[in-house]
Image (tube, rainbow, N blue to C red):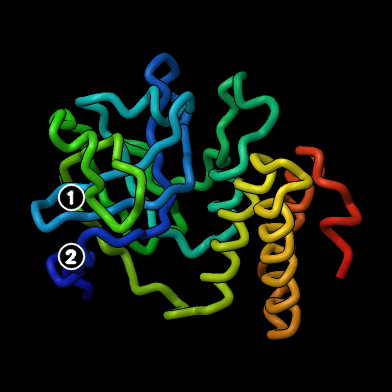
């Protein structure tokens, strides 16, 4: 049996997760977002949430949410890449992806989930980075509980780490000017990750996820010859 008290998070480093909450005006609709979270020694969690997003507008003081550490990479992809009909409040993840919705959504694929509640961000912290990033956090929360359901099946897996890096890159590429150095470098890194996974003969379990990422990039004006020239 896994004791929750035995799980410790290293403070102030990035843990990639799926943050799940409810839309306040549609309690049966789940908002899922792929993002890094940062734990502190004081039983709190800081998040860096993009402005002008549903997640930022939802995570107001008092709101409860869950941090899910999932083994299903496809769910990270769906949570990270917004669909065109998102404004219609269609769930990013299917309802059958969740084992529980009360009091917060918990993914079936999560080997660990952290239930949190947003608290006020002191003004003094708003301009001071609290982790190893240049940006300051804009969401502060307290930990309500940590649930460890099982040990992950695959430990320290380089393929999973590379796939997550490719996902992060895919969210950035559309933000760059196509003739910029940053665009070229990120396209190259994205393609190199795909090459590496193929070389390791580990692309099969990521195939559907990369298909979603490729289509997302093509829909955001990335040229096919830039994406598949390898």
Which element type, helix, strand or loop, lies under badge 2? helix
93 on left or right of 140? right
Residue 141, image x and y in percent?
20, 39
Q: Is residue 103 visible?
A: no
Answer with left or right where residue 183 lies relative to residue 64.
Answer: right
Q: Nearer the viewer, residue 198 or 101?
A: 198
Residue at 16% from the left image edge and 42% from the top image edge: 142
Q: Residue at x 47, y 24 (%)?
A: 52
- Position of the N terminus, as image quadrant, is bottom left
Secondary structure under tag 1 reads strand
The residue that mark 1 highlights is 145
Toward the top, the furthest residue is: 25
Query: Relative to residue 211, is residue 215 depicted above or below?
Result: above
Q: Are marks 1 and 2 in contact (CB under 8 Å)?
A: yes
- Give percent across and percent down for residue 114: 27, 51
Disc 2 target residue: 4
């Amino acid at each position: 049996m896994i004791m929750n008290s035995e799980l410790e998070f290293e403070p102030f480093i990035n843990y990639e997760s799926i943050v799940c909450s409810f839309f306040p005006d549609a309690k049966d609709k789940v908002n899922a977002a792929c993002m890094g979270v940062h734990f502190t020694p004081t039983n709190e969690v800081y998040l860096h949430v993009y402005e002008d997003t549903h997640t930022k507008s939802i995570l107001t003081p008092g709101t409860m949410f869950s941090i899910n550490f999932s083994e299903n990479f496809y769910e990270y992809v769906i949570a990270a890449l917004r669909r065109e009909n998102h404004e219609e409040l269609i769930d990013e993840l299917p309802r059958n992806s969740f084992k529980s919705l009360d009091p917060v959504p918990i993914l079936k694929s999560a080997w660990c989930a952290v239930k949190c509640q947003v608290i006020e961000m002191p003004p003094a912290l708003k301009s001071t980075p609290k982790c190893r990033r240049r940006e300051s956090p804009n969401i502060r929360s307290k930990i309500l509980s940590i649930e460890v359901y099982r040990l992950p099946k695959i430990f320290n897996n380089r393929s999973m780490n590379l796939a997550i890096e490719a996902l992060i890159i895919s969210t950035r590429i559309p933000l760059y000017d196509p003739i910029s150095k940053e665009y070229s470098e990120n396209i190259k890194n994205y393609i190199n990750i795909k090459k590496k996974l193929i070389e390791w003969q580990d692309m099969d379990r990521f195939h559907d996820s990369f298909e979603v990422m490729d289509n997302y990039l093509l829909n955001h004006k990335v040229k096919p010859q830039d994406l598949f020239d390898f």
